[in-house]
Image (spheres, helix red, strand yellow):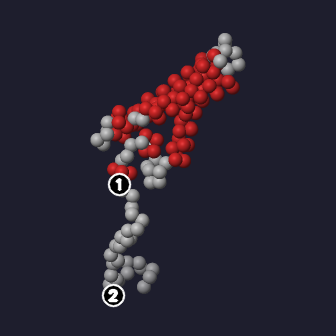
Amino acid sequence: MQLLGLGAMMGALGQAIRAIVGLKKVNDAVSNTNTSVSEAIDPSRMVTSLVIGAIAGSLASVSLIDNINAIASAQIVALLGAGYSGADFIEGFMSRVNASPGTPVGQEAIGVNTAASAAAPPDPNAAPATTPTPTPVANAASDDDAVG
């Protein structure tokens, strides 16, 4: 039980390190909008992310540590990495699978709308936009020397 607890704590800590990087991305994404950082953060998603990291760390601890009384520092770092990368892999995969069509890459993960993604989707029943076609000029000289 201690082994699972250690793995869960280290996995959640590894995920918390990843969350710091994510908070920086959110800050950068909302800097050009009227949204504040606190409005862009979803606390339930952050807690879920920490739980995923804890689970990944627990699973890694079972396979990584043989003796709970003799744990090397490299094993602790490996548990941190398991929490970081395990949650990153699962969330990255799920954001790609569940992303709405037309969402820019990266925006589905942080949930911030840009001007391009906030625009209304095109109306499928609207008439297609037409562009004027150039009128050919009779007896115009060709720029292509190979064609007479």
Q: Is residue 60 above or below residue 39?
A: above
Q: Residue furthest top?
A: 69
* Residue beneath the point at 39% across and 43% down: 112
N-terminal of the pair, mark 1 or mark 2, is: 1
**Residue 17, how many percent across, how many down?**
48, 27
The amino acid on which the numbered mark 1 sits, given as a three-letter code, is Ala
- Callout 1 secondary element: loop
> Horizontal placement of 55 versus 101: left or right?
right
> Which quadrant would the N terminus be assigned to in this image?
top right
Between marks 1 and 2, how big is the CA–CA gap? 43 Å
The quadrant where residue 144 appears = bottom left
Towards the viewer: 125 or 118: 125
**Residue 55, how many percent across, how many down?**
59, 28
* Residue 80 appears in the figure: no
> Which quadrant would the C terminus be assigned to in this image?
bottom left
* Residue beneath the point at 38% across and 51% down: 117
Q: Residue furthest left?
A: 34
* Residue beneath the point at 47% across and 54% down: 101
* Residue 141 appears in the figure: yes
Kindly identify which numbered label has been placed on residue 138: 2
Residue annotated with mark 1: 119
> Horizontal placement of 34 versus 106: left or right?
left
Within 10 angstroms of label 1, few (less than 14), some, or many (20 or more) residues?
Answer: few
Q: Is residue 94 above or below residue 4?
A: below
